[in-house]
Image (cartoon, rainbow, N blue to C red):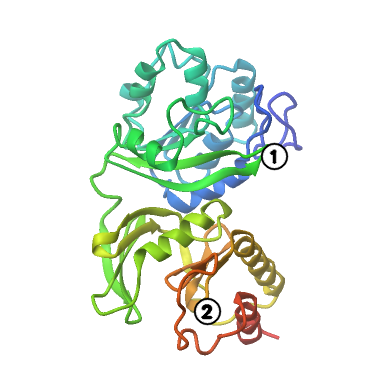
Amino acid sequence: MKTPGSATKPGHLYHEPAFKSDLPHQRGNADRWRILELHEDWRGKVVVDYGCNAGYFTFMTATHGAKLSHGFDIDREAIRFARQQAIDNSIRNVTFNDKDLANYYYHEELNPDVVLLLSVIPWIERTEPNPWTILRELMTAKTAYIELMYEGDGRAGMAGIKSDLEAKRWLQGHYKTAYPVGWTWPEHNGGIRRCLWRCSQEETPGRKEKADHVGSQAFVYLHERIVVKAGRSESRYQAPREVVALDRMKIDMVAPQPVFINPGENMIGMTRLQGATLASWGKIPPGGEDWFMAQAERICLAMEKRNVKHNDVRPENLWVGADGRLYLLDFGWATVDGVGEVPATINPEYRAANDRGSFEKIYERLCQK
């Protein structure tokens, strides 16, 4: 690999490429990839990356199992750099093209499984007199990851879309399912935010693999891409309570992203993460102590900032993600802004004055000394 650089200064393949724009920020490619890696299996798939710049995501998908990854960008300098990187690093399952989206459509000849539209839609809206014709062509793939900015969140915000709900309605006009999988650039640059959505032409977000339950409170149904949680008829579990907490925490990337809520059936859906529970590890291996405490601090700071208390922190509710992060699951007994009753019998082994105390007890029990 080459030394670190950018699209204008050739360098390392995975270095964050330059983002030539007049927006007051730069791309957070590492954070974006962390989200994409958690939610998509790239093996054997054909990927099209629109607005690829120097090819960061084109290369990442190609080197994580994609059959072919095609990058497109109007910036010829960036495309020349990406092509040279492919040659220098002997990556043969990528192509790069500098044709303008307004004048050329690629779906029929490439037949992609996954399309990436990361910060592309605002630029089409700003430069084309009739952007919707182009967007309809781009949004016909089987699966798409679409990054949106909402009206009021910056000059590149989408006109008429001001919230997750409005974005979902718009996206479901093109796809059968659409749900958010993460936030990029959260709370940076005066509040500018972008939401990354996974959209699919499937009727449901993947097949249901199996059904199980958590304790005596709720059933959990595992689909390919989402987890559906439904309270038992005799339980005190309340889906609206959990979704409020998940919604409050969604931009911090410390818990699953909320997908939908059905209050009538006491049911919620959330994104399914790749990885395993901390309980399945048994012990935190030597050398992992600092990692665990750093992740615990990240989660605790996020909850304190959002005024959320989990109240049931234990190894079974801690998820070690494929991206190397620790995530907190099951906010069924969470309180937000101090609202919500917590049974005195919950979490008897790790019960403490606060969530930090529970993390400390887990550390004492699971870290090998």
| Residue 3 picture location, percent across and down | 76, 37
The residue pinned by badge 2 equals 314
Residue located at (53% from left, 43% from top): 63
Residue located at (35% from left, 56% from top): 226
Q: In which quarter of the image is the C terminus?
A: bottom right
Q: Quadrant of the N terminus?
A: top right
Label 1 sits on what residue type? Met
The residue pinned by badge 1 equals 1
Q: How packed is label 2: few (under 14 Cα within 10 Å), some, or many (20 or more)?
A: many
Residue located at (60% from left, 46% from top): 31
| Residue 175 picture location, percent across and down | 30, 36
Q: How packed is label 1: few (under 14 Cα within 10 Å), some, or many (20 or more)?
A: few
In the rendered image, the vertical position of residue 43 relative to residue 264, given as above or below = above
**Residue 89 location, quadrant:** top right
Q: Nearer the viewer, mark 2 or mark 1?
A: 2
Q: Can residue 296 be seen in this view?
A: yes
Label 2 sits on what residue type? Arg
Label tally? 2
In the rendered image, the vertical position of residue 132 relative to residue 328, given as above or below = above
Q: Which of marks 2 and 1 is nearer the N terminus?
A: 1
**Residue 17 location, quadrant:** top right
| Residue 225 picture location, percent across and down | 36, 54
* Left or right relative to 361: residue 177: left
Q: Can residue 284 be seen in this view?
A: no
